[in-house]
Image: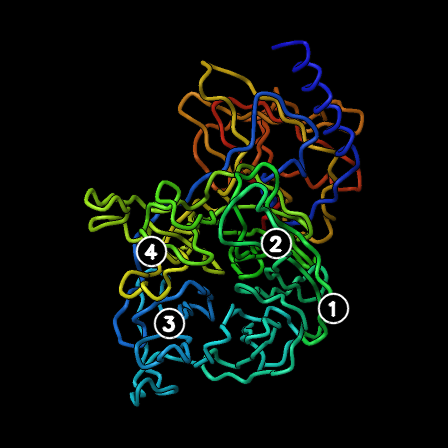
Amino acid sequence: MTMHTAIVAVLATLLLVGIHAQQFDLEYGTYLFHDSTLVQSMKGASFEQHRPIKQGKIIVRDFDWETVIFFYTSAIQAGPGDYRLYYTCWGPANAEKTENLCVAQSKDGITWTKPKLGLIPYDGNYETNIVWTFDWTGWPNTVNIDQNPDAHPDQRFVMTYDKADRFLRVASSPDGYKWQTLESPLIASQFADTQTVPIWDHRLEKYVVFGRVDNNFNRHDECTGNYNSYRSIERTATLNSSIDSFVNKTTTVMTWDKLDPVCVDIYNSAAVLYPTDPLMPNYLPKNVAGQKTSPSVYIVFPSYTFHMQNGTTPINPYTLNFGHNDNLLDIHLAFSSSGLNFSYVTKEPFIPRGIGIRNMTDGTFNSVGSDWDAGFVFMSRGMFEDVYSPNYINLYYFGTQKTHSSAGDYQNLSAMGRASIRRDGFVSLTTDYNLPMPQAAIVTRPLVLPSASLCSGKQELHVNIETSIAGFVSVEILNSAGQPIPGYTRAEFISIKGNFIRVPLMWNVAGVYNTDVKKLANNQTIQLSFEMSHTKLYALEVACVV
């Protein structure tokens, strides 16, 4: 290490300490280690992003009205054993004048069927799974369950959509099948360019919506091509708890930056407020009375796009003829506690495109034998906890062998797929596995435990953690002076070795095993001091155990 890099490292550590010296009030619930929000200092560890495991196609073309499955899709859980995927599709009889919103159903989120609803016909046939037909100039965006506890029963399902003006509009439904539209725009600006996402934020008691806006920034000085403007993810919120009170002014929360390669642009958000919207009940605090909110973090899964340059085969090897605004897309991952400023752990794709095979005759890629998602991938909005293994989360995404602007050529080549990831396992604080027995030291910022009066049982601290066979985790609790608290020292801690979604921190005090930290929950500040080796630390949970 040079003198310069040593000074930079020290200054970075001092900056982190300065930013996070103030106390952080914890609630009952789970906190992801997705960034340094809870961290005051760390040595020998870094943030690592993890990829989900692709599980294959789940929705493919079965009927004429879904000859093309388009990439605006939503995944919701309407109730126990009632999982749904909403997807845009069309067929020859739509004649490029209309497109359909279809629904697939599942009892477990893994095996899917297409109901014959008898609601909307296609070419005279009413035995379809179509729930709405749109004019070709507009698009269905996102279907969601309204988590507002005061929402009218007829508004239990909400859907954003747009028309040719790209203004945000909303439809509502009591059952997710029969819809009523609110024709007046909720946001009278071009906010609805690509799958706007409405979310009820229980912390604000307001609706928040994420959309994509053309920010009219020209990067031709860097990227010579056929597209003259770049986009950003924007956010706005309602004035109150009514969904028709959106502020007609948006704020940029994510866009490309100077770390991105030239010709790279940003697409949809597929935003979720994890784990409350979409609601995953088993991930929420249990046995807690009176806590109005719970820890949540906004997660977005933007597709990054690479704008093709006209007619240049080395840049453009997928077809010999690219049209306006053609590009490749893969799925990325970013986080924000507030939903106002998103940060990445890495610009590496979260869900990459599949493997392609090059045609040796004409030089193009994605010939016969390529993966079904080798052209581009696009995240569905929503996720479910796995009903068979609650240690995992099911994610859903659109994929095709084609590129973005070959929409007319998606026929029979587009589908939806499932991927699975460890519960809370998007990012971890990871030690260096390449050293024999390194010891990472991580100290949280000053924390205040939630009120003991909200919990009639023991107050415990659980970690989501994975160690190698030689790895370990050791934790002690420090007081406001930075000194170990008797009964919670490292010497008394029962070392953790293994792979756990939830394992309590435990100390052996004079032969008595203790996991209860309730006596520390009297508004005093504490810090957790971790020592780890060959370990991934994913999350911290404050739990009430009865």
What amino acid type should be assigned to the residue bearing mark 4? Lys
Q: Quadrant of residue 485?
A: top right
184 or 396: nearer the viewer? 184
Q: Which residue is painted at 43% across and 81% down in the image?
A: 133
Q: Which residue is painted at 54% across and 73% down in the image?
A: 161
What amino acid type should be assigned to the residue bearing mark 1? Val
Circle nearer the viewer, 2 or 3: 2
- Sequence order check, earlier mark of 3 and 4: 3
Q: Which residue is painted at 40% across and 44% down in the image?
A: 352
Q: Which residue is mark 3?
A: 89
Q: Measured from the top left, where is residue 357 in percent x and y?
A: 24, 44
Where disc 3 sits, the SS reads strand
Where disc 2 sits, the SS reads strand
- Sequence order check, earlier mark of 1 and 2: 2
Q: Measured from the top left, where is residue 421 in percent x and y?
A: 42, 46
Q: Which residue is painted at 50% across and 43% down in the image?
A: 426
Q: Which residue is mark 1?
A: 247
Q: Quadrant of residue 73?
A: bottom left
Q: Which residue is mark 2?
A: 232
Specify whether 327 is left or right of 231: left
> What kind of colouring is applied to the model shown?
rainbow
